[in-house]
Structures are given as C-alpha cells and as structure tokens.
Image: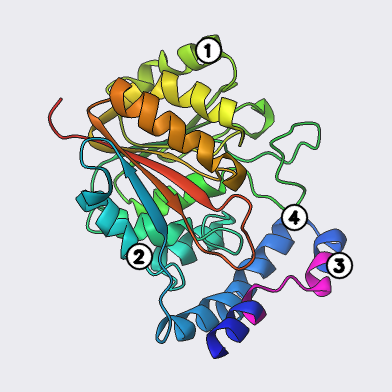
Amino acid sequence: MLGSMLLAMADERTSLSVVLQRSMSPKLFQFLRSKAWYPLVCFPRFVVARFIRRHPVVRGFGRLGDESALVRQIQNVNVIEPTKMCQVMTRHGSDKGRRAHNYTTVYSALLRGKFNQPYRIFELGLGTNNPELISTMGIAGTPGASLRGWREIFSNAIIYGADIDREVLFEADRITTYYCDQLDPAAIGELWAQPELQNGMDIIIEDGLHTFEANLSFLEASIQHVRPGGFYVVEDILTSCRGAWYNQLENVYSMRYPDFEFVFVSLPNPVNKADNNLLIAQRSLTL
C-alpha cells in the first residue's frame, strides 16, 4: 500500500505543471522539470525500490525462446529503481526514464559494463515540435535530447540520428544527424548509403513513428546494419499491437533472421499502459 501511494504521488501530473508548460519557454520548462524530477520522482522511487520489486513481462523468440540468457537478464530488472542513465536522460530532456516510460532501467542492465566502449549508436527519431507532423512531441519536447544523453553515457561513442523533420537536424561533437522518412524505402536506403554510416552499428534504436507498419518498414531495411553482438531496439510499441508483434516474431522474423534473438518486453508502469513496450533484438556474435 505504501509503495503504491508513493508511486502515485511521484507520477501524478499536477495542474501546476500544465500551467507552467503553457506560460514559459520550452527550454526553461525542461530545466525546471528536470530539477523537479529528482525530489518528486527519483527519490520516491529509490525509496520504494528498497521494499518493492516490479519486473518486466518478457517473451523470447528464436532458437532459445524464453530460456535465453537475454530473457533472464531483462526479467531480473527492477523497473521501479532509478539508475544513473535515468538521471542523465531526464536531465537532457529525454522521456526514456522520466515518467511515462522506464526504458532506462532496462538499458542500464543490458549495457552495464559497456559504457566506455567506442560504440557506434544510431537512433531514429530526434523528436519534433512541429504540430503538423504526426510524430510531434508538443511544445515541451526537446529535439535531440536522447542523442545528447547517449553521448554523455557512452563517453567514447559516436552518435548518429535521423528524423523526418529537417528543422530539428543538427551536428555537434560526436553527433551527426540525417533526414529519413521511415515509411519510404528509398529514403531509408539513402540514409544507410551515407558514407559515415557504413561499417554497421552496435546499437540501433527506433523511436520514430509509433505504428506497427512504420516499425516493420524501418526494421526490415535496417536490422542487417547491426554488428555482431549488437542490439536493435524498437521503443513505444502500442500495447494494442502486442498480438501482431508476437505473430510477426514467431512466424516471420525468427525464421527470416536466424542470427538474431528477439525479446518482447512489457514494462509495468502505473501511468502508462498504452505504449510502454520494447522490442529488443540481439545479433549473435558469430554470423
């Protein structure tokens, strides 16, 4: 009971937050929101995690299915307990571990001990504020937040990104971004033809247009660019599409991509039952 009360208090969206969002610049609002995250969300969850454990619901597909080490590793994650990655991503304005999503708890466990590696990391979906685009985050979103977070977490990595909104593309130290429409096979082909994107990626994250069709479109044109031992991740999968994904993974992808292990992850979250789901695919070390 205590844990449920604390979680509800930590995750409650107050009317004050809405008023502040409408009355100040997005940059100032994000600064204040990240500062408020520590006492209102991070600390309560840290306390609750001492007494309560909540684990993802995980289903494996491929040669080993639910018996794989990857499945067991993710099943052991306590999605309540905040991590350093949660803090970094939230400070940069990413929603990967802020409130509606707790992906950073899974990423932290999955990538533990690898943060100093000279990885090549690619993420589709920088985040746009353009209200004309279906993928808009709204005025309070921070384009490029996750890329900056990955750059800080992986101190020796090169970070790449892409988005359909050309206005949010940018370059910075160890970050390069490109245009891509994930529903257009030609655009995806042009993306992966870029000279800088040759030689594969250690991690590819798809956080673009969150529809089943869009997810399949980008995955099928991109998963072969994952290096041996690397990961391909799809974020924000609609819970209503879980059955379609199970069917696709069991009857299509597990046979089409035998060198990949696929894991569908549903994370418990009291404020988000709509799309707090991940697909994680890991390529075997030997091709």
Is residue 10 a member of the stretch shown in magenta? yes
Taking the view exactly as shown, the residue that stands out farthest to the left is: 286
Q: How is the image coloured?
A: rainbow
Q: Position of residue 231 (x, y in %)?
A: 32, 39
User: Disc 1 vs disc 3: Cβ atoms closer than 8 Å?
Assistant: no
Q: Are marks 4 and 3 in contact (CB under 8 Å)?
A: no
Asked if residue 169 is positioned above or below residue 193 in the image, the reply reads below
The chief SS type of the magenta part is helix
Q: Residues within 10 Å of mark 4 (few under 14, many from 20)?
A: some
Element type at mark 1: helix
The magenta span reads: 9-18
Q: Is residue 36 left or right of residue 45?
A: right
Identify the residue position indicated by label 1 in the image: 185
At numbered mark 3, what does the secondary structure look like: helix, strand or loop? Answer: helix
The numbered mark at residue 26 is: 4
Which residue position is annotated with label 3? 19
User: Counting residues from the N terminus, which is met first, the one under dot 1 or under dot 2?
Assistant: 2
The mark found on residue 77 in the picture is 2
**Circles 1 and 2: CB distance less than 8 Å?**
no
Q: Which residue ends up furthest to the top in the rendered image?
A: 186
The first of marks 4 and 2 along the sequence is 4
**Helix, strand or loop at disc 2?**
loop
Of circles 3 and 2, which is in front?
A: 2
Could you tell me which residue is drawn at 51 percent across and 63 percent down?
A: 268
Decide if residue 209 is on the left or right side of residue 257: right
- Do we see residue 111 in this rendering? no
User: In 3D space, how far apart are the residues under numbered discs 4 and 2 (Cα atoms)?
Assistant: 33 Å
Q: Residue at x 36, y 48 (%)?
A: 59
